[in-house]
Amino acid sequence: MVSYSGAEGGIVYGASNGPGLEVVELPETTAAVSHQFLDLRLREASTLLVGAVVASIALLVSVLVLAFINLRTRGQWLSLAFILSALLGLELWLESYIRYRYEQDDRAHIARRLGMVRANLESILNNNLSLIKGMGIAIAANPDLSKREFNLYAKETLRTETLLLNFAAAPDYVVKYVYPEKGNEAVIGLEYMSTPGQREDVLRVKNMRRMLVAGPVNIVQGGWAFIGRAPVYYADSVTGREVFWGIISSPMIVDDVYQAAGVNDLANDQEIAIRKKGLNGEQRSVFFGDPQVFEQNPVVSEMLIGAEMWQLASISNKLPEGLASALNGLRLGFLLLLLAGAFFLHVRIRQGNERKNLISALRYRERMLAQVGRIASVGGFEYEIDKGFIYWSREVFKILGVPFSRGPLHDVEFLDLIEPTCRDKVREALRSLSDNASETSLELELLLDDGRHKWVAIQAYSEISDEGRVKIKGAIQNITERKKSELTILRQANYDTLTQLPNRSLFDNRLISAVASANRSGEKFALLFIDLDRFKSVNDSLGHAVGDQLLQTVAERLNRCTRETDTLSRRSGDEFTLIATQIKSAKCVEIVARKIIEELKLPICISGNQIYVTASIGITLFPDDANCAETLLKNADQAMYAAKELGRNRFRFYTTTMQNDADERLRMHMDLIDAIEHEQLKVFYQPILDLKSGDVCEVEALLRWQHPEQGYIPPDKFIPLAEDVGLISQLGEISMKTAIADILEVNDDFGLNIGLSLNKSYREFFGSVDDGEEPWLSTLLSSAKRPPITIEITESILMEDDQVYQILDKLRKGGIKIAIDDFGTGYSSLSYLRRFPVDWLKIDRSFVRDVEEDQEDLALVESILAMAHKLGLSVVAEGLETEEQLRLLQMRQCDMAQGFFLARPMPLAEFKHWLRERNAPIKIAGDR
């Protein structure tokens, strides 16, 4: 027997108590709008309006009586104001009820039409989905079916009156059968698991065991379609267990579905939008119509399509008939009454306003000074050598946390507020001001009476009278937040923001120091390379937020396995490194490694999810395996990969026979050379938008590799390899020449002046500096015609000081801008930004990603923006993915941004098409 579970959406073949097919149909929603209910609402609205008019007349009479009494007792101006306010309130009240009555009539009409369209659309889609379900049942009954059998089933099914274009069967996620095959040859062999956008959908169908509708999507055969998919399970004839066979799917052209259901006809007369609801009730993006329809109090109707709920919403695109004239008449009458009342009220209060203006002018300067002090958190003071403090402004009391009623502090009390390490600076400054009429500035850390720490900046100057009396005047400013931001920016150069562990830069420095120290003392130490097993699956299934919490918990557990003399670091992603010092033998390191593995085996509960994580650990010993930091890291990395190859959740000591990784790198090296020769590397372009104008100011050139056998190879795999093996210059040359020619072509075609941003690595800057100027630099500077160019470099390149300054200076003199890429994740300090000719800072995506929820990340972004603008630098935010991120960045005067929310990286032809669709000036969310 074959059965289909409508609740689950999966197709299962197995034995039953009786012959034939048993099909449990998907539940259908009911519900066209009730005309009796709508008529009842209209009658209620009419009754309510009559009651409102009667109540309004009664209110007006009451107001007039009260105004007359007030006129006799308290004065004319108050009475007139009272009458005008009452008239205005009455007009707004009546207008709202008139609008309510007309809008209810209009909503009733919208609801009737929307109900018919909803019923049609639900019927059409579910009828066609039932055919897909039938095909899945047929396959489950005969899982070893041949192509001929599949074609017979599909042909017979498509004989019915259906909108289905074809059937595609994908055993083990690979499309094997398609009917009809003609015109659909491109689908055969499609691997869902390696196709972006398809993998997630089919896994969702399989894991949920439900029939789902994806789309609208751009199908391989061309055009936009809804794709119905169902998982196919069958019962193994030997074990009786359910076995996943694959996916059966079929597309329906979107326009045909809309036309058949009457959606297009309805959309011509009123605004309509359609969206899906998640299985947990969450709202998803709108795929038909304007998303704003759902935000404007629409009439909403729901329907069940497959195993998902869809929502149809509609609003009128015009005012209800007769509403405008009714409102205009009402407004005109009340306007005349208000004008008359306003005239008399104006005459009565004019003299009073003139008197108030005179008083306000006298107090203006005093208020302005106080406001400036509060805004800037600045207060003034006066001090005399023989008397101490003789004056504090109110803001000084506030900054120092001293009650105003207490008065200025004595000298000793003021010094007690200052951190002991700063007191000598105060005494020295006081002596200098007392000896000569001069100026001074100090930054001091205070410890207030309530235990809080606060930073203040003091600017002061001294005056010495003819009698030798010294008077000091100055200002105190609260700079606590500025100091916190500076300390945060400095800390990020050495510590990982997520785990608070030392980052790669600090760890590498400590490893070099450990080598030097061990060489002097003759002691041994061990380097452990710790990589979490299958961490990516946690990110993919539970999200990055859970992944981040998992990394924090792992860091805490690793810390419990170390000593104070050890150094634990988060190197990158899910990789950690550990320097274990004072090691007597390999047995000691083995104890540490086993402790780490056992500690990580314990379950971790995050947001209701119980997660189990393991680690693969590579271990190398100094000086047994190597005597330099670079080789130790390489050895530990190889040992870690050896542990993974043995099954993960274990540790391995480095041995000289570990060459698997080296062999793999060699194969990729050869493939990369072949890719360069056969032009497998393509240049993609991601626009960078000006957040003020919305215009495309530049595009970033990004290299992509489509391997003929392995498919898409991420840049983070082949770019580091290219740097290591000396191919990075060739890749850079390909990218630069192609991108310059392409962007010149784009600018000529569209009459634009779009700039080009090129990434340059450390090796490209210094790979052959001994032999003279880098070839790419000579090519770029000697180019007769080029678009505006920006060279992106990482912060680590700035560490080379004089060498990099010479190259950057040449670029600047050649009219080329310099941008610091991934700012905030590398080595640089604020001094480098002043010393080198830098134009842009590109804030790393790791800071932009969480600005909506993480106040620390938002504070860091604010600090970087403030610092950059003070230094005259422009700022680009990378990795922009949501509209809320865009809004926050615009509010904080971020100059430019790039990311998937604005535009994805795209090849030249697609980029041109993207520009053509923006023949009007480009606008972004914040400019609307």
Image (cartoon, rainbow, N blue to C red):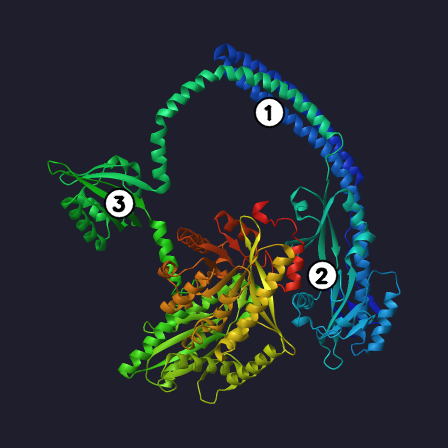
Q: Where in the figure is residue 15, as x and y percent of width and height? A: 79, 75
Q: How many marks?
A: 3
Which residue matches tag 3?
Answer: 459
Name which residue lies at 57% across and 20% down: 84
Nearer the viewer's eye, disc 1 or disc 2? 2
User: Going by the image, does 910 lie left or right of 182?
Assistant: left
What's the residue type where badge 3 is placed? Gln
Seen in the picture, residue 455 relative to 95 is either above or below; the reply is below
Name which residue lies at 30% across and 81% down: 518
Tag shown at residue 217: 2
Residue farthest to the front, as pictured: 784
Q: Where in the figure is residue 836, as x and y percent of width and height? A: 39, 61
User: Going by the image, does 56 lie left or right of 142?
Assistant: left
Seen in the picture, residue 324 relative to 380 is either above or below; the reply is above
Name which residue lies at 22% across and 55% down: 421
Q: Nearer the viewer, residue 890 or 49?
A: 890
Q: Nearer the viewer, residue 462 or 764?
A: 764
Seen in the picture, residue 97 relative to 732 is either above or below; the reply is above
- Element type at marker 2? strand
Give the mark nearest the N terminus, 1 or 2. Answer: 1
Name which residue lies at 81% across and 54% down: 123
User: Going by the image, does 637 lie left or right of 58?
Assistant: left
Q: Is residue 201 visible?
A: yes
Which residue matches tag 1?
Answer: 89
Q: Quadrant of the N terminus?
A: bottom right
- Element type at marker 1? helix
Nearer the viewer's eye, disc 3 or disc 2? 3
Tag shown at residue 17: none
